[in-house]
Amino acid sequence: MVENDIFKALADPTRRAIFEKLAAGRMNASSLRSGLDISQPAMSQHLAVLRNAGLVREEREGRFMNYEVDPDGLALIARWLSKYRAYWPARIDALKALLKDMDQ
């Protein structure tokens, strides 16, 4: 299931940090490593996991590979979350009603 791949990819704090950096705009791997204490091979592995989950896409520019957030991956997350968005208002309303009954 694709959602599982996405959540597994984002479960790692380093990958979340990389993804957040990419949310600010397109970058190459060297720029992404700035501020993170990881090696180039580790960065490549993290980017591969994010890419395989459909969260990041890459494009070669000259001798550099640039990475950016893949909007299709974000759309999958949004669709998955939308299934649960409707659940919470009804639950909160039920809780409010219960608390109101308890106060009386």
Image (spheres, rainbow, N blue to C red):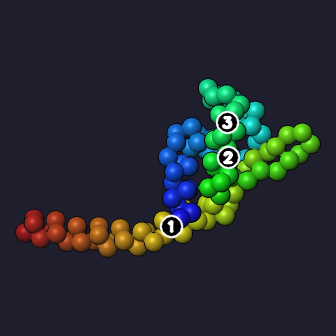
**Mark 3 or mark 2: which comes first in sequence?**
3
Answer few, some or many: residues within 10 Å of disc 2's Cα (few below 14, many 20 plus, some between 14 and 19). Answer: some
Give the mark toward the camera: 1 or 3. 3
- How many tags in the picture? 3
Q: Amino acid at mark 1?
A: Trp
Rendering coords of residue 69 (x, y %): 69, 53
Viewer can see residue 23: no
Q: Amino acid at mark 3?
A: Met
Rendering coords of residue 99 (x, y %): 16, 65
Q: Secondary structure at mark 3?
A: helix
Q: Quadrant of residue 62?
A: top right
Q: Quadrant of residue 66?
A: top right
Residue for badge 1? 80
**Mark 1 or mark 3: which comes first in sequence?**
3
Q: Secondary structure at mark 2?
A: helix
Residue 46's disc number:
none
Q: Nearer the viewer, residue 17 or 24?
A: 17
Residue at the (65%, 54%) spot, across then down:
52
The single residue placed furthest to the right in the displayed view is 62
Residue for badge 2? 48
Q: Nearer the viewer, residue 84 or 38?
A: 38
Distance from Cα at disc 1 to Cα at disc 3: 28 Å
Rendering coords of residue 93 (x, y %): 27, 71
Whether residues under marks 2 and 1 lie with C-beta atoms below 8 angstroms apart, the answer is no
Residue for badge 3? 43
- Say if 65 sits above or below 70 in the image: above
- Say if 64 sits above or below 37 in the image: below
**Mark 2 or mark 1: which comes first in sequence?**
2
Viewer can see residue 56: yes
